[in-house]
Amino acid sequence: MSEEIVNEIKLPNESELILSSSPHLHVKQDIRKIMLTVLIALLPTTVAGIYFFGFDALKVIFYCVAFCVLLEMLWFKMAGKPMSTVKDGSAALTGLLLALNLSSAMPWWVCLIGALLAIWLGKQVFGGLGHNPFNPALVARVGLLIGLPGYMTTWVPTKLMTQTPVTEYSKQFFSPTGLTDLAAGNLDAITCATPLGVLGTTEKILDTTVQATFLDVSSLDACWQYFIGNVGGCIGEVSALALLIGGVILVATKLIKWQVPVAYIGSVAIFTYIISSIWPGVTPMPLFHILTGGLLIGAIFMATDMVTSPMTTTGAVIFGVGCGIITCLIRIWGNYPEGVSFSILFMNALVPLIDRFARTKPFGFKKLIAKGADA
Amino acid sequence: MSAKSAYKVVTFSGGVHPDYDGKDLTRECAITEAPLLDQYQVIVHQNIGAPPKVIVNTGDEVKKGQVIAEANGFVSVPLHAPTSGEIGKPIEVPGPMGTNVPVVVIDADGKDEWGELMPPIDWKNSDGDTIKDRIRAAGIVGMGGAAFPTHVKLSPPADKKIDYMILNGAECEPYLTADHRLMLEQPEKVLAGAAILAKSIGVENIYIGIELNKQNAIDTLLAKADEYNVKIIGLKVLYPQGAEKQLIYAATGRKVPAGGLPMEAGCVVQNVATAAAVFDAVVEGKPLIERITTITGTPVVKPGNWKLRMGYTVAQALELAGGVKENPGKLILGGPMMGFAQKSLQVPIAKNSSGILLLARNEVVQYESMPCIRCGKCVGACPMNLLPGTLSSQIESESFDLAEQYNVMDCIECGSCAYICPSNRPLVQHFRRAKAEINMKRRAQQKK
């Protein structure tokens, strides 16, 4: 080998070599990208909400996201934490989830209180991202429901529902005065009931008139309306179709454990099927329960929150079934028409226990136990 | 291809597959013999266990293959001269683990003359101990990375019946292709080596597990496998497919008990490069003085597979590969998942140096570690079915007893969890720390 060639060869500069422990490769995924993907998965239902409830919905979304991000930044400033942490996108996601859990008629100051409850009480007091035991958006929703029940149980109809002539489907959700206002074109003040709200006001007795109500609210036509989202409710919970698209995105990108929504929705279906088969006057058939209220947004986006759900797949199934059963109990026999938020928060509290119970067995562990028993 | 039906495809549960495995850089690069050097710096302690005792003095003339250090105890192997020449002054050089290590310096005479070779063994008609003694005399250790003396692995206690000899040709570490080229270019050596290893412990069932991304190696070995009574097993491309316990499970369906050794599942696992070295030792009488090393990475001018003598330094090896195009951010001995980052180019190649990998500055992972968001991806990736996220939180709060209850000692440090973690948590470092703390506690208890 001649010397000239050797001289041309450039060797690494030792002083620039970085020393660190293995592994030296890392997947191209981080918290920011995860949050961004969840935001994208929420886009269909966000768009659906704005489509059905109009500009008001957009305002609520804007308020919630802005307040959540600002309050998170304010907390960082007060706590002396690096401001860059806000870039992880978790506050924006909490803000959007909060907005999707509110009615489009919400005034800005309720959004502010909600953001306070979510970011400060729900998340930062526990130590911030990764340390909160409860889903922050649900802490806010339930806090508002208890503190400001009037605001949280007043629903506005979708734009389609107020179109004249009012369809038979829509009529069942308006009060007599509401129908008069509608006929007079007095749309500003008009409110409507949600399907679950209609059930809440009917007495649960074995009565044929009650069963008729059930048949009305759970007719195929009504279920189709619920599926596309033409129904009163929170901004983000109305369109089952849009929520399912988001769910497919989350499962395809492996950001949620599919066991949670499947166990949750499945147990609601089985539970309500059994109850409605035995006592037809107590509750409608499963399809109604799946498509109405916050079940889908809860099962797909809220119960699957990584921080507040179990780490193992076995745990995820237990968690999902628990959410499903509690939701049914509240919906059918509880004082509130809807039980999704309560059930998820309750199961959130059980997650440390579930995680302990559903621990994985290390590879080869069983044999060792068996051996130890023999000896 | 009809050969496809000739082998079964198996895998384990868990694991990760890197987006880019870097094997395309060197997959087509045939093994090239490295030129002779003027001087070799041979690390004395290249095996797990006791370091061998140096028996040569400054000024001694040695021949290629001559013993320069004697085995010191059962878990120890001798060391041989990589070329003929004169022994220089003993010095210390930077070692692969970051500390300085003693080396035997050989100033080559350029003749590269073999000393007296060990007599060939008719292994088909010899007993196990003869083969094992030869394997030990040739200084053979696990060449996949662990450098555990091979003869020790072949000496299970009398009450442990061994049913399977499994050769690891998975080469699941990204970037490395040395084993791939070896199987492709010297299939008979690998197969015969496997048969010799099996013969030494009286085993009938011989498997070679190969990842499906080395189809041509599978086909090459399949063509001759029957002659040696070897079965080829296709392994799904998944890291860490070549980890001992995972390979045993994939090949035989047997689970090595937690905390136990492969022999407790009736298996012995050896690397394919080790098998080839065994062939050289038994059939040709040559000791282990060289190995195939992949020199690779995007900053390398001419990545390739080289046959390097022990005592080549990283700098000299990189010169063979034409040096670097740009200043790299990291130098790794071994693969990117379990290899060791190096600070010095003067580290000599050892028996377990399967690769010299350079990562460009933009490929080096240097993220800020975030809190665990409990996404559970690590749980899905862990081949040992542990809870890495939970463990790391426990260790962060120094709850080592709790971590022990959660089986941190079963961690094989493959790095799958740290690779997949979206919060970039230093999981493997946490586990190494906990293992060290727990081992320290156990030793203290034993003393009492």
Image: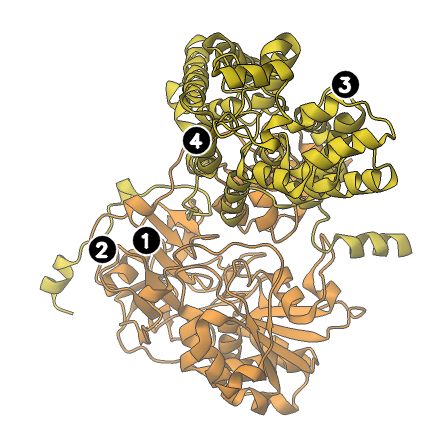
Label 4 sits on residue = A51
For badge 3, the amino acid type reads Asn
Label 3 sits on residue = A335
Give the chain of mark 1: B
Query: Which one is in front in this view, the residue at disc 3 or the one at disc 1?
Result: 3
Say whether marks 4 and 1 touch (CB < 8 Å).
no
Residue A145 visible, this angle: yes
Q: CA distance from mark 4 to mark 1?
A: 53 Å
- What numbered label is drawn on residue B85? none
Q: Is residue A280 above or below residue A102?
A: below
Give residue B136's position: percent from left, percent from top.
Answer: 57, 72
Residue B434 visible, this angle: no
Label 1 sits on residue = B358
| Residue at image coords 27%, 67% | B37
Q: In front: B54, or B124?
A: B124
Query: SS at mark 4?
Result: helix
| Residue at image coords 43%, 19% | A56
Q: Outermost residue, right direction?
A: A374
Crowd rating for badge 1 (residues with CA inside 10 Å; few <14, some 14–19, many 20+): many
Give residue A132's position: percent from left, percent from top.
Answer: 59, 23
Q: CA distance from mark 1 to mark 2?
A: 9 Å
Q: Colour of chain B?
A: orange
Chain in yellow on the image = A
Label 2 sits on residue = B324
Q: In front: A296, or A309?
A: A296
For badge 2, the amino acid type reads Val
